[in-house]
Image: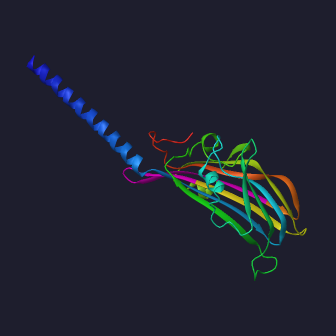
Amino acid sequence: MDKVIKITLGLFIIIMIAFVSFYGYNAYVSQKFATTSSTTTSYSFTILTDSVLTNVTIFIPVPADPGGNSPVIARISRQDISGLPAGWQTTLFDSGKGTMVKITTPSINPPAGSVPGARYENTFTINTTTKALEDTRSPVDNSMMFRPIQNLKSVQCPAEISTLTGSPECYEYLTTVYASYDTSPDTTVIIKSSLDVKNEWTIFSPEYSEYRTDLFLLMFGNNHGWIPIRGSLITGLGKPTPTSAPIQG
């Protein structure tokens, strides 16, 4: 009987130690994650041209979650935009299918001293850091994207992407922009926009999860209307965010 009691007591002690260790480990992980986690959002819009553009009006999608929210939109609403060229006006619009920013300016001119025919660019950026994490595995369903998203399809990742940490998945899609401006018939105009969203945290070592999406459009001569723009998306970079993370969406 004494032997049975000793064995039972020993098993009970082992179970209690395992329980306390498991609880302590999870408490440590949760505490470290809560105090070190953050999300960095890097957004940019660029227009490149090799000649003067006049009477410029552009509607470009800005990144938002399915509910129409994002720190980028909040910053544009406050006109807190880095590098916004002089004379550019920005106004937010809800199209019903996505959030867009209307950009207007009387003209886009080459900088003084530019070589004739050389491309020059105008870029503005918004960088934010928040505690609310984003879903880097399924951003189309849950996180910030350029919307609306049409004809989404899976594609093979470029070789340089396949070498990055994580399990990257690559996609292409279409959305739309409105571009109206006057210029010479042989003018080249490129519109680009990019979004890089990265969750970061440290438990035993620094870790991250990330997704990236970009828009690219090449035009020639005058344009006065809506036009499709190609988008690319890379998800699943880095490590999966811990399941205890308070992910948006």
Front one among 172 and 225 = 225
Residue 43: image quadrant is: bottom right
Q: Which residue is rendered at x = 63% and y = 56% of the image? A: 78
Q: Residue furthest right?
A: 185
Residue extending farthest top: 1
Colour scheme in use: rainbow
Magenta-drawn stretch contains 244: no
Residue 206 within the magenta-colored segment of the rendering: yes
Magenta stretch, overall SS: strand
User: In the displayed structure, does residue 231 sit left or right of residue 78?
Assistant: right
Q: Nearer the viewer, residue 236 or 202?
A: 202
Left or right for 130, reference 192:
left
Residue at the spot x=75%, y=77% of the render?
111
Residue 66 lies, in percent from the top left, at 65, 41
Does residue 19 appear to the left or right of 65 in the view shown? Answer: left
Q: In the orientation shown, which residue stands out farthest toward the front?
A: 78
Please state the horizontal and vertical placement of residue 56, each as a whole percent of the image: 82, 63
Count of picture labels: 0
The reply to whether residue 9 is in sight is yes
Q: Position of residue 162 (x, y in %)?
A: 58, 53
Quarter of the picture containing the N terminus is top left
Quadrant housing residue 57: bottom right
Between residues 80 and 202, which one lies in front from this camera angle? 80
Q: Quadrant of the C terminus?
A: top right
Is 69 situated above or below 162?
Answer: above
Q: Is residue 164 visible?
A: no
Depth order, front residue of 169/52: 52
Residue displayed at 79% across by 73% down = 109
Extreme-bottom residue of the structure: 113
Q: Position of residue 140 (x, y in %)?
A: 64, 43
Residue range corresponding to the magenta coloring: 197-217
